[in-house]
Image (spheres, rainbow, N blue to C red):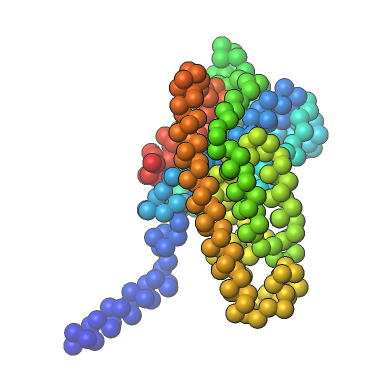
Amino acid sequence: MQKLTRIFFVTALALSILCFPTKAFAKAKIQIAILLDSSNSMDGLIDQTRTQIWQIVNSLTKVTKDGEVPELEVALYHYGNDNLPSQEGFVRLLTGFSSELDLVSEKLFSIQTNGGQEYAGWVIRSAMQQLNWSKDKEDFRVIFIAGNEPFDQGPIVWSEAVNLAVKGDILVNTIYCGSAESQERQLWASGANLAKGSHFNINQDKKIEFIKSPYDEEIATWNTKLNQTYIPYGATGEVGQQRQAIEDTNSGQNLVSRGISKASEYYNNASWDLIDALDKGIVTLEQLSDNALPPAMRGMTLAQKREYVATKKAERERIQATIRDLYQKRSEYVANQRQANASSGDNTLDYVIIESLRKQLAAKGFKLQ
């Protein structure tokens, strides 16, 4: 009788898992939508975002929920630019939520500033209506909108747009890029308050201080070796690999920060890298034809392909571990240099984003180290 009871219990549990999958079997998710004013006066804002996107990612590398590193997805809009269609509110979606950070970086470098009408309400509404927001309220979902014109410009009432976020339990953080004493700033603050977010004032033209360390060249060398562990596959393989190399170049002296991001669990290229795709269960080696594989793998037996992938994966993990160790040493060095020089990253885009993310993630039940 006990045996039958045990069999019944196990069968019922299995059926409940199949029929009623729960959040316990899926990673938590962090979704960040960044909305950037790209009018003429915002060159500094765009530059700060380009150079510091990797520092923002790095600030999240020790965040966990339920003992796991969450998935990170970033979406990107720019608005307030005469090059964009007026019938679309001078708003353009550059990328929807993506876990492929090279794509986000590529889109950031595609932005060209120009004068225009800056409709904050319109771009917030677009982000709410167009993006694939998680329906799980345990996930972290946030909009960052930055600009320097009146928050109530345009035909879309800003409060109605922000209320879409309120109804979706999505935070809105506003970043005003103008004088702290400006009357225009008040509505930007009101937008954040309505959506239970934070409001900041930054100097978008402030140059980000880069502190060199004795570990930078070594990190850059290991970054180059890390690139050699990627296995392009399918129609997008070559494009993805080229994008990786281009974004390394675009990062300039911030290649150090980018290299550290690439050693984290957030750096994923499943659309074009075979190792990431296999880990995500997107493809199997059995289903890929030789033509979908890089030349080095063509003609291999299935066993040889598995061995090749396993070797590259192990090599990648060793390199990433090395970069993380160097990052720890670099962080300690930079912290000491900042303290000695009484320097801080205050009043820049990366600083306010990192500070607000840490507080808001903790409030949402994510664990920060």
Task: Give whichever of 235, 241 is nearer the camera.
Answer: 241
Q: Is residue 302 left or right of residue 236?
A: left
Q: Position of residue 236 (x, y in %)?
A: 73, 60
- In the rendered image of this protein, does residue 122 appear above or below residue 69? above
Q: Position of residue 191 (x, y in %)?
A: 53, 28
Q: Quadrant of the C terminus?
A: top left
Total numbered circles: 0
Residue at screen point 45% across, 60% down: 26
| Residue sticking out furthest to the left | 1
Q: Position of residue 217 (x, y in %)?
A: 61, 39
Residue 236 visible to the viewer:
yes
Q: Is residue 346 left or right of residue 305?
A: left
Residue at screen point 43% across, 45% down: 63
Q: Picture quarter containing residue 143?
A: top right
Q: Quadrant of the N terminus?
A: bottom left
Task: Give whichever of 48, 85 is nearer the camera.
Answer: 48
Q: Picture quarter containing residue 366?
A: top left
Task: Give whichever of 229, 52 is nearer the camera.
Answer: 229
Residue at screen point 38% across, 76% down: 15
Task: Give whichever of 151, 113 is nearer the camera.
Answer: 113
